[in-house]
């Protein structure tokens, strides 16, 4: 028989990351996405780029690259490079790591109910 203690009932206290850390991490990720966009535009054959640029503006492609970067980073590594550099992590409302569905939503939407940035400890 196990006795419930306060540690079992309440999750460990986490400090919410400051707005500065959140914005700086997002800025780092945005710069990386723009660099990735330009690298891909040189690597992808020209005939594919011609067909891609007709229906969409380059700005929309940059947003898609940014979303793809966030999605793959969150699904594979549980954080982005900007989040690692600023020592923050995403946790859900129960202060647990995000599920796959929450990660997909977090990759495409900035504000998700119950998901927030917290300082990374250890």
Image (cartoon, rainbow, N blue to C red):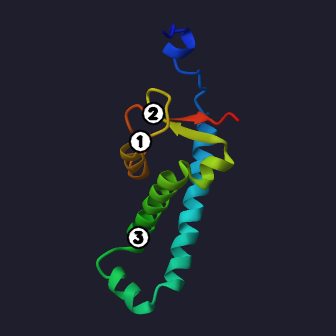
Residue 20 quadrant: top right
The residues bearing labels 2 and 1 have C-alpha atoms spaced at a distance of 8 Å
The residues bearing labels 3 and 1 have C-alpha atoms spaced at a distance of 27 Å
- Find disc 1 in the rendering and name its residue: 99
- Find disc 2 in the rendering and name its residue: 92
**Residue 25 image label:** none
- Find disc 3 in the rendering and name its residue: 61
Label 3's element? helix
Label 2's element? loop
Quadrant into which the C terminus falls: top right
Counting other residues with Cα less than 10 Å from the Cα at mark 1, is it few (<14), some (14-19), or many (20 or more)? few
Ranked by sequence position, the earlier of labels 3 and 2 is 3
* In this view, 105 is above or below 29: above
Coordinates of residue 113 in the picture (x, y in percent): 37, 33
Coordinates of residue 14 in the picture (x, y in percent): 59, 25
Ranked by sequence position, the earlier of labels 3 and 1 is 3
Label 1's element? loop
Q: Which of marks 3 and 1 is in front?
A: 1
Counting other residues with Cα less than 10 Å from the Cα at mark 3, is it few (<14), some (14-19), or many (20 or more)? some
Q: Nearer the viewer, residue 98 or 34?
A: 98
Q: Do the residues labelled 2 and 1 touch (CB within 8 Å)?
A: yes
């Amino acid at each position: 028989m196990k006795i419930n203690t306060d540690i079992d009932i309440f999750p460990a206290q986490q400090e919410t990351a400051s707005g500065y850390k959140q914005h700086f991490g997002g800025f780092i990720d945005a710069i990386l996405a723009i660099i990735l966009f330009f690298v891909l535009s040189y690597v992808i054959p020209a005939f594919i780029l011609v067909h891609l640029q007709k229906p969409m503006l380059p700005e929309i492609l940059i947003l898609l690259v940014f979303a793809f970067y966030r999605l793959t980073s969150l699904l594979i590594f549980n954080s982005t490079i900007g989040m690692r550099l600023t020592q923050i992590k995403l946790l859900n409302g129960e202060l647990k790591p995000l599920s796959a569905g929450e990660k997909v939503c977090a990759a495409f939407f900035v504000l998700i109910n119950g998901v927030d940035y917290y300082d990374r400890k250890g």
